[in-house]
Image (cartoon, rainbow, N blue to C red):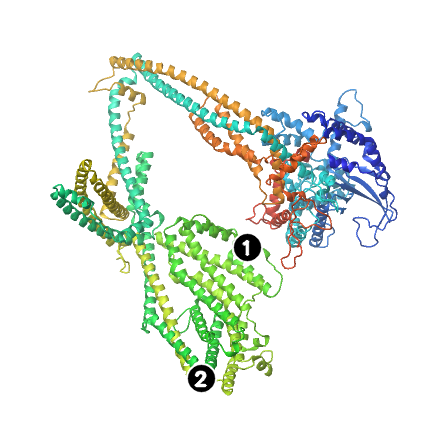
Amino acid sequence: MEKLYAITSDPAETPHEQWFQTTYGQLIEDALERLRNPINPSTPHASWQLFKQLHHSLQQRAQKRSSLVLKMDEISSKLAGMKDTVIAMPGCGTIGEVVTISSIGNIAQILPTKTKPKKLVFIGSDGKKYPYLFKGLEDLHLDERIMQFLSIVNNMFARSDKGRSHIHRARHYSVTPLGSRSGLIQWVDRATPLFGLYKRWQQREAVAQSLKHPGQSAPSTSNIPNVPRPSEVYYAKLNPALKDRGIASSENRKDWPLTVQRQVLQELLNETPDDLLARELWCSSTSAREWWEVTQTYARSTAVMSMIGYIIGLGDRHLDNVLVDLVTGEVVHIDYNVCFEKGRSLRVPEKVPFRMTQNIETALGVTGVEGTFRTSCEHVIKTMRKGRETLLTLLEAFVYDPLVDWTPGSEGGYTGAFYGGGQAEPGGEGNQSKKDMEREIAVSMFSIRVAEMKALWYKNREAVQEALPVVIKSIQSHTKCQDNLQETLSAMARLKEQKKMLQEARSNIKHDLYTLPERYEEHAVVIATKATIQEAIQEKLNDCEHWQKLHESALQMVQGPRLQQMCAEVGKPFSVGVPSFAAAIDFLQSAGQGQMVTQCETVESELSAIILQRRTLIRTCLDVLHTYATMAGHFPRGYAEQNRSFNYQKWLQELICDFSSLKCQDVLSSFQNEYHPLPTSIQANTQAVLATDLKLQTVVRDANAKLIKLMERRSIEQVETSLLGVSVHATATSIHQYVEENGVYGITSLTSVVVTAICSLNKRYLLMEGAAAAAGDRLMDLTSRDFGDWFLDELCSMSGNINQLMGLLKERPLTAFEDSDQWKPALHAMQASHRVYVTLQELNIHFRNIILPESLKAVQAQESSVLAFLEQLDSLVEECGQPLDELLSLLEIELRNAIMGMEQTNPDAITTVNSMRAKFDDLIQQSDAECTELTPGQMLLKGFNGLFVTLDSDLMAMLEAVRTVQTPDLWKKVDVIREAKGLQMSAFSSGAVSLLGDIFFVRRVKTMQEFYELCQKMAATLQGNLGGDVYDDDQLSKPVRHFIADFVRKQVIGLPSQTLGSILCTYINALGVDVTAEIELKDIGASSKVAIEDLCKKAVDLCIKNDQFEHVHLTEVSALTSTHDAAWRKQDLARRLDSNILLLQASVQRCQIQLASYQWLHEDVLTQAGRPLSKMVLPLRATVMSEMKKSVQALMSQESNACSVQDKYLQLESSICQRLKWASGANPSLSQTLQDFETAQTNRNTLLQAESKLASDAIKMCNAIRHCEAMRTRTQDGMAADNNFMILLARCQESCNLTESCETTVTKVEERLVEIKPLKNGQAVDAEWIRSVLEHLTREIGVVGGSMAKIKAAVEASKTDVKAKVSSLKTVLSSHHKLMSEVRSSLKAMAKYEEQDGECDDEAPDDVREYLITYRAFSETVSQFMKLATADEITSDIAIEIESMAETILGKINSIYNDLVQFASPLKVEASDREEPSASLNFATALKKTVDKDVPKRPVILRPDLSTGTPPASPQTGTTKVSAPVGKKEKISRDPRTGKAIQERNSYAVGVWRRVKMKLDGRDPDISKRLSVAEQVEYVIREATDVDNLALLYEGWTPWV
């Protein structure tokens, strides 16, 4: 108020301001004085009375028509006095003569809308009048940008319409912002708002209604009857409909049922004509042809603005914002303030993409939306999609535009006008915005109220916590009483039913009850037979369930860590320890119990021997189990279910659920198909299994043949690799000694020899790289001609050879290099390139050694974490929206463009890769964060990915090292450097390196996906019986080999050779040959090159000529170097062969295990087919089972012996312990002996228990596995089980047939009567039998009736108690709601400010909003709880629901109460404020002080960044100082190199840009699916015309017009 008063009390500058101050100045001062110093501060509402009077006076004046017209000379004498200016007319183009402002009309018309805009008329220098709308209180920069957007779209339409004049055009107007608070909008002539058509219809209807009454005359023009506003029309329909649904108030829109809103809309649609606009277009046309053209123009214009509005998210399309030029049919939209999806965040969200109501649709013609409108919509969308790059570029410019504030929470409207829109006056200190002031007051009032009610609030919490359990206990007691009553009523009903039957039989001698003995006898036989067989079924079912649990447990232990733990425990050194009786020997000897000592020693000897023997047997069992576990690791997850016990269990459960002859036949059929199939089905499965078995045997044979060939090659060199390493070291030492002895001669000669050798090697290196480059996509299969070694092994060996020779020079550098490090970068680059080759080799080796076998094993075993990882990987690839091959093709194009310096053509591909990389990184990090112990899936993922990560790291190190090598330009004419440069496929600029990284990241994902697809196919083949593909290691490694080949070809080839050529030139230069001069001296044409060998030879000759060394030195060093090089080559070959042999040995072993596991799984099929099991399979299943049977039987036999010996030992220990206790009672000195004995006894018992547990676990595992295998295959036990099951099924069939053939029936009532008085020895049902049963029932009914009365009384008492307890709880909750209502409005205000903070800052906390959401859910739960607790009847189900709700409420109570108090800022008094209040301290000042002190203490609520009108990230222009909180400096992003402020993007605008891009890409509403143009148009038309969407709109939108 004070700020508003400061604005209006400034010295008057115009006559109108003088009139305002004279008329209202004193009244404003009096009102402010009353507010500052209220008469009674306890009634603050009285202080606002004068302001209410002032508001009423101003409101009355505003409603007068005379107040809507102002004279320019009264409101702005400067504008009124402007004559013949040189100011250009706003919005007029610069083509031709420039129109300037000659004068301004003296009349300013005020439009009666919210912001009261003024219509002004400018007189142009051409004599024409130019009307404009002057809008204050709004920033029109965004509207100006939207007009630019429409202009660009019109240019696109002009090109796409192929010369046809303005077929598709978005009609727009000029917008001229005059600052951040006002601007001029060009007045749209000849355009009629749709609301005007609707209002005129209302007036016509009102006049027509008035004429219907007799005696009424037509109203005059000045006395047109008032028509209701749209909101009045809407609520006149809505309120009665809501009352019919039991909703008394229409204030809370959330309570309105959708059906009611739809009903109201339908009624309004029926009452409102749908041809208002169509008739106006018809009436405005002079001929049918003109009407047709106008209608077509209208349809196209509507389509253009609808689709553009949809793309930019234009909202607030009420009838005043949509205008139609009735002459041309063009549609004009105004007021673009609610765009970019802001309509979805309004108080009443807008769900329609554009306005398509009944009047607009009818005006489209007879085809409606299906004719010209739809085709035009598709044309517009297609055109905008085609030009999306231009449109997105324009929008991206908006993103960086500091003049446009896109944030939905920015200051605007009245606040922006009166308080600066977030900008302080130049030179000012920065005033606090209205929003911040309101925020501070809200927080302060909330804190004060919480402080006042804190004690009551916590007391209420305790009351709720005490009352709730009491209510629950009372409800439980009531439910129990109700259950008892229900049971009693059921018992009474049964007794009365029995009594009724007896009474009927007594009165009717022909009653069926008299035939009960004959019927019951046959019925009893059927029931007994059925009960017997069902008992047998249940017994068999229990047995199957017992064995199935043992099977699953045993397999889990074998495949899990338990077996490994047992093996480790058995493998430890073992000792039975000191006998327990050793501590009591002296006591026993002295007590004359020598015989007992002898007995103890004998038993101890027996026990020790048995324990050691049992330990040996346990080890034997575990060895057999370990062999079995090797096979079981390749079995599928459901292996335990592939046996008879599981199938029997499943079939028997079906029989229990449906005990009928038909179900027996079904079970029998399933049994026959599973274990006794027909020959035709056996033949089909057998052929597939035999074929797969043959393929697996072929894989084993091929791998074994490769291994034999490799071992034969290794046997040529008998020396061990370690000895070859010694030889290499010895030759290197000889070279060093020679160099030491000969000094400079030795160094120079060694350098000459090594450089000459490297020249020769470099030629071979170039040839190998050339062959690799020429191989192209076949590089992965490229091998050497001699021995078939892979190209990578050859390149790595060659690189290693060169590096070891370079190492000789590195240790003894030339004299020329002593004072220079120019040679070190090149050497480092060469070593880095060799490291890349080594890493590639390690990638291949580690993959085949670790990743491949473990992955295949895990996939075959259907390990859950591995399958989950594969699903996530597939999902990651699917989310790309395109195949990886297509993505790689696009990236290859981008790479070529980057190398050639061209612009990007597929930026979406890079965006897709970045998104994929982020999701892949999240997948990796998720595996790190989920748990401390990694699952198999996480280990495989991290291990596989780690190989590629290491490779990427080494590649970056190599590229960085290569960049440091400074090669003179002339040196690039040397043949080796030039040829190597020609082999290089990629340029390594920053952009190209980034794209290469993207390409090989995608290839990495593709490699992993392809490899695991092969694993899954292989696993499916091995686990099923339908055949399929079988892959060897080479085929499984193909994806990785392909990756390595592409990696080498595109990123490595050429770089090592270039670096090596530079090294050679450097050394030749150091030997005395000026390489640069030599190149310049020769006449080199464009295609000529200098041979490195000539330069090398010249360097050697020059050294000899200059006496740097002699021929003898050269000869001796050459011999030593050749010997060293030959030794190194032998060692390198042996090392590679050894590595490959180990690799193949592991491969052969794994293939053999695969073959064995497959034959184990399909042993029955192979055996029935007559094929003998392969000799390559070790071990055979029958052999393992036989060994397991022998070992477990021996262990079980030994276990019984051990138990008997342990019993003897325990008896002796007990006897000794008893004697010691007696003796220690008389002789305290024996207490220590007793204690030592008990300790030794405990240790021995612990040892015995551990050994028994170990033996027991081993026996259980072995027996369960033996039983599982016996039930899985066609063994004697399995066949015997089949026979027993068949017998049981036959008995079931007989019982079912007997039951179904029995024609007599006995009712449940008759059965209960027989139970009361059984019919023995053929006794008939006669009058005596009936009388005795009736007497019994009468007594029972009396007893039950007596207890029922007591139970009913208890029910009523418990019901009364429940009501009393609920009433007490209701009183407590009423107090809670009363307290909460006092702070609810403040909480909502604080939540609103938090929401505004969140729109500007995604990371802004939203504690209050979350609290309100939580509290709303809490309140709903409490309301539902009270509703159920006060129900007339509380059933058991309701009681369970009530208890569940009570637990939820009690779990949330503490957070609900505590969090509310925590939101309040602590009320503290600062030292500077502890002064006595002065006489001038009034109520408003005191409140302001409280706010200033308290609010900053709550940083969650107060956001200093929101004090400015522009987003926190937006740069400020000009010299205007931005208001900010005191002591808080604004953060400005600066360039780290220059220190200059950099332009930043508006974060909200970035979201807008992405949303528009998604629509232009056709990915709305589903970003994962791209729609065609027709599909996208169909979607938006459907959404725009959906009745539910229209029914939910704000009534001012008038969706029924």
Residue in view at x 33 percent, y 34 percent: 657
Image disc number at residue 812? none
* For residue 1368, above or below residue 70: above
Q: What crowding class fits label 2: few (fewer than 14 Cα within 10 Å), some (14-19), or many (20 or more)?
A: many
Task: Please say if the residues under marks 2 and 1 sit with CB atoms less than 8 Å apart.
Answer: no
Where is mark 1, residue-wise? 914
State left or right for residue 913 relative to residue 325: left
Q: CA distance from mark 2 to mark 1?
A: 58 Å
Q: In the image shown, does 550 or 603 lie closer to the viewer?
A: 603
Tag 2: amino acid: Leu
| Element type where label 1 sits in the image | helix
Where is mark 2, residue-wise? 1114
First in sequence: mark 2 vs mark 1: 1
Residue 367 visible, this angle: no
* For residue 869, above or below residue 416: below
Q: Nearer the viewer, mark 2 or mark 1?
A: 2
